[in-house]
Image (cartoon, helix red, strand yellow):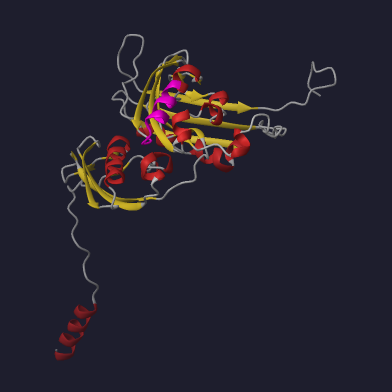
Amino acid sequence: MMLMLAAMTMQAKEAPPLPPLIAQDDLSEPGRPTTNPGTWVTSDDYPARAMREEREGTTGFRLSYDDSGLPKTCEIVSSSGHADLDTMTCDLTMSRARFQPGKDRAGNPMGGTYSNRIRWSIPAGPPSGYGREGDLESFPRGPVARMALRNIDVAGRYPKAALDARAEGDVGFRLDIDAAGAVKTCTVTLGSGTASLDAATCAILKSEGQFDPALDIEGRPVAGRVNHYFVWRLPSPVAATAGSLPKPAIRTNPFPTEAGSALLEYVIDSAGTVTECAAHTEGFLARGAKGLELRDGCSAIRQLAPYQPPRDAAQNAVDRRYRIGMDIKLEDMSASGLAPK
């Protein structure tokens, strides 16, 4: 009998522990971002004045969001040391961040918080002339500056007062552009510190601004808005001397040398929520910076949600799938130029 009790005691000691009990009715889930946090703030968003003054730093922030996934507050938990960089961090994350709300134990959506850090590091920019900052106010395509505006002769339009004062600077501005691509209003959003440069920027854009207009989801021209900047750098002595500019070199071929395709496919449901999104690329459109941009197309789609719900002919809200594609094919032509080989 004593041996049997000892054996039973040893077996009891060697038995594995029972797994913890799991509440079957616990439906809780943590919240998460539905857009790529890396797209909330980019180098294109760098404040012009901070860039000019070569100010950098890291901003730690905490967002709170409600049970619909929309940010409600932004708190700076560690400053970059520069108020404008901290303010820009909150402004951009509040406007661009979107979340999948968490769930409580009963499965009801609930808000939450999200913390991260933004490293403000000065990017390389254009030496002089027209430049582009981040713009998501028009979708799927905002107004696009034509090449004539991007290649504008800064030296020939430099204000005399600024030349005499040897003044340089970056002018941030906002343009309202109509459906024909014409600049209707120009507002300086961040001055260069030199009044003549600020005034000359809007004067040039109003008189010479050439844009391809914004497009809506159906590809129709619509009014749009851009937030850009203009870089004023004093012209070199060579550029200031009439007739001394070198003859322009023959440009490299800007056209693709092989075929490629891209497809962006997404679903917006009857509540205006993006429920599916996928990007597919092939050929030269799958490689390099262009490939990365196209594959990240879902970030912009989700970033601007929620949308007005799609509606059928009877104006009832419905789920709808959208496909936006681009297919580039190359064909060598015969000597006559009338038919492919």
Question: Residue 308: percent from the left, percent from the top?
Answer: 31, 21
Q: Nearer the viewer, residue 105 or 233?
A: 233
Q: Quadrant of residue 217?
A: top left
Please identify the residue farthest to the right as the structure is shown.
335
Q: Is residue 240 left or right of residue 102?
A: right
Q: Nearer the viewer, residue 99 or 48?
A: 48
Task: From the top left corner, tell me how far across and down residue 220 is, in percent.
Answer: 46, 14
Q: Nearer the viewer, residue 312 or 188?
A: 188
Q: Is residue 122 above or below residue 339?
A: below
- Magenta segment, prevailing SS (helix, strand or loop): helix
Residue 201 vs residue 128: left or right?
Answer: left
- Determine whether, in the image, residue 302 is placed left or right of residue 164: left
Give the magenta range: 192-203
Question: Residue 334 colored magenta?
Answer: no
Q: Residue furthest top?
A: 314
Residue, x 50% and y 38% (percent of image)?
233
Q: Position of residue 37 (x, y in %)?
A: 36, 44
**Quadrant location, the N terminus:** bottom left
Q: In which image quadrant can residue 142 be found?
A: top left
Residue 139 vs 54, above or below: the answer is: above
Q: Quadrant of residue 252?
A: top right
Residue 273 visible in the current orientation: yes
